Image: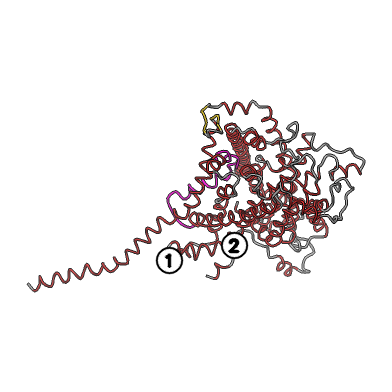
Amino acid sequence: MSTLGTPTPLAVVEENIPNEKQRRRGARTIRIRGSRPGWIVYALLTVVFATGAFPLWWSFVIGSGDASSLRRPFTWIPGGNFWTNAASVVTNPAVNFWPALWNSIYSSFLIAAAVVITSTLAGWAFAKLKFHGGAALLVFVVATMAVPQQLGVVPLYILFAELGWTGQIGAIIIPALTSAFGVFWMTQYLRQAVPDELIEAARVDGASMLRTFWTVGVTAARPAAAMLFLFTFVGAWNNFFWPFIVLDRQNPTLPVALSLLQSNYFVDYSIVLAGVILATIPLLLLFIFAGKQLVSGIMAGAVKG
Amino acid sequence: MTTTASRPETRAQTPEEPRQPRVISFSHRLSKWDLKISPYLYISPFFIMFAIVGLFPIAYTAVISFMDWDLVRNSGTFIGFDQYIWILTQPHFWTALRNTFSIFLLSSIPQLILAIFIAAVLDRNIRAKTFWRMSVLLPFVVAPVAVGLIFTAIFADNFGLVNTWLGNLGLPGIQWHKDPFWSHVAIATMVNYRWTGYNALILLAAMQAVNRDYYEAATVDGAGPVRQFFSITMPSLRPTLIFVIITSTIGGLQIFDEPRVFDQFGRGGAGQQWLTITLYLYDIGWGQWNFGRAAAMAWILFVIILLIGLVNLLITRSLVRDEGLRRELTKRQEKELARQAKKDLKEAV
């Protein structure tokens, strides 16, 4: 049972280079791939990192200036107006910043939680239970991943208009409660993480299907579920097209609220970019705490994908 | 009589013995039932929701696309392929198609090259691996709308950062919002900013799966890092590359967020310089409120994505077939060589 608690490595095996290096230390002069690279590699990585971080820093610099800060020569140093600009973003009646923030938080959370639950259930069935049509249904689910979002928006809009839900946050939560990618992800993970013998053993011991799912499946699925939660959360938080269509301007999510910031003829970029930074902070915090998991999630998903 | 009296007793006893398991067999039957039904119960939450908000809308989009939809009555009259013909005869549609492909190519090609390069650097045995991997992923968490707004300011025509720098170098500024090509470059830059690191990590995962012994052998044979990259790394990346190309195609052809916020009007520019297919779909559906045409547009977009997917598949297959052919050829050559060797032997004898 102890093996269940620890996350099983999926496919990416961290190479045991320190050991190899120790073994070879001083024995060879030829540089093999496992040896430590020179400073050029770190310089290149620093450039890549700077390219990624620079636009964020620059928008903070502009966002902390005043209306003319974009016209002034480039500077690295932020001005002192960030809080003034941020205040004018959150008090702007056209933007509805606080409702937007709250909408984004709870809708993304509900969507991610629901996707994890439905995907874990379905993934368990596809990976470990035998039933008629299982393989065909899984192929079907994977095939739908290529269907563009745009193919469903017109009838969905009509449906929610009929229900009187346009403008309601429920209209963006309900369609996102399931994810074909999530089912595929969970199926792939559980197939590798749980040996069939373990399920057979549980069955022989008289555990019901639900109990087997709960004690064996859910326990094993935890690391993959955490990653699926993170990815779904980020995806739901950043989603724009459908919320932009179905929500009204009084009750937006953060990306929709952001897009409203520059809907005037005269655009004050110090305010717009202060709003961008303000709206990006929650996900930056999430990234600082969970970036490691996001990285390993991408690396694991890639090999299986 | 005594024998007949004793007989029912034994009879009663013998059925009683299997009856005891039969008491257990109720739970046994239950568990059999459990075994049969449970899988369907587990997949049902997904499929029920999926049918309502995923499958039904797709089918219904097809129905609506053949209709002249009336928003007041909320129903339509059947008009056949008229909506499709209307869209395909709009010059805006062809402009949008051109723009979408142009932005897609400008984003995916440099992005892939950069991603492979970054992945190759990350694949070295660097210190603080996790930190560098995370730093590459940073742009991925920034919302596309936020990226769009930041780069719209960077690429502003008059006081944008890039044009200011160009001015400092004594170069004329670029008309990012007037010239179609440069507007595509600006939007493609936004896409590249957000996705390059993500794709680099996917490719890095594939690189790490390559057996390290190959590199060691190549090093011993005297192959440099560049030669090793093109002879070992690239060939083994092929399936992952195709996966990345297909996913970025599906995403790239649907581009909406970045061009939508590229100016304050969100209509793809005064001369449709950066109008994309999805932007056009939005305008038809929720700008002109014509749902029949928007639905037809959605189906056209889907067909385009399918066609590109098919092209990708053909490329994949031809690549695989290539390898097969090569192997076949070498086998044939081997046979030929063997025959030649036999001939030589006979002649020698």
Between A295 and A88, the one lying in front of the other is A88
Q: Residues within 10 Å of mark 1 (few under 14, many from 20)?
A: some
Residue where numbered disc 2 is placed: A223
Task: Please state which amino acid type lies under the numbered disc 2.
Answer: Pro
Work out whether residue B259 or residue A163 is closer to the camera in this orientation and state it: A163
Is residue B339 visible in the rendered image? The answer is: no
Would residue A246 appear left or right of A68 to someone viewing this image? left
Vertical relation: B173 (above or below) B23: above
How crowded pointer 2 is (Cα within 10 Å; few <14, some 14-19, many 20+) is rated as: some
Q: Secondary structure at mark 1?
A: loop
* Res A207 label: 1
Query: Is A253 displayed left or right of A171 in the figure?
Result: right
Q: Position of residue A252 (x, y in %)?
A: 65, 48
Residue B278 position within the rendered picture, expressed as x and y whole percent measured from the top left: 65, 38
A277 lies left or right of B56: right
Q: Callout 1, which amino acid?
A: Ala
Res B108 quadrant in image = top right
Which numbered dot is residue A16? none
Q: Earlier in the sequence, mark 2 or mark 1?
A: 1
**Residue B32 seen by the camera:** yes
Which SS does the magenta portion mostly show?
A: helix
Judging depth in this view, the residue of A298 and B206 nearest the camera is A298
Disc 2 sits on a residue from what chain?
A
Q: Which residues are magenta?
A: A128-155
Q: Is residue A264 magenta?
A: no
Q: Position of residue B47 (x, y in %)?
A: 49, 49
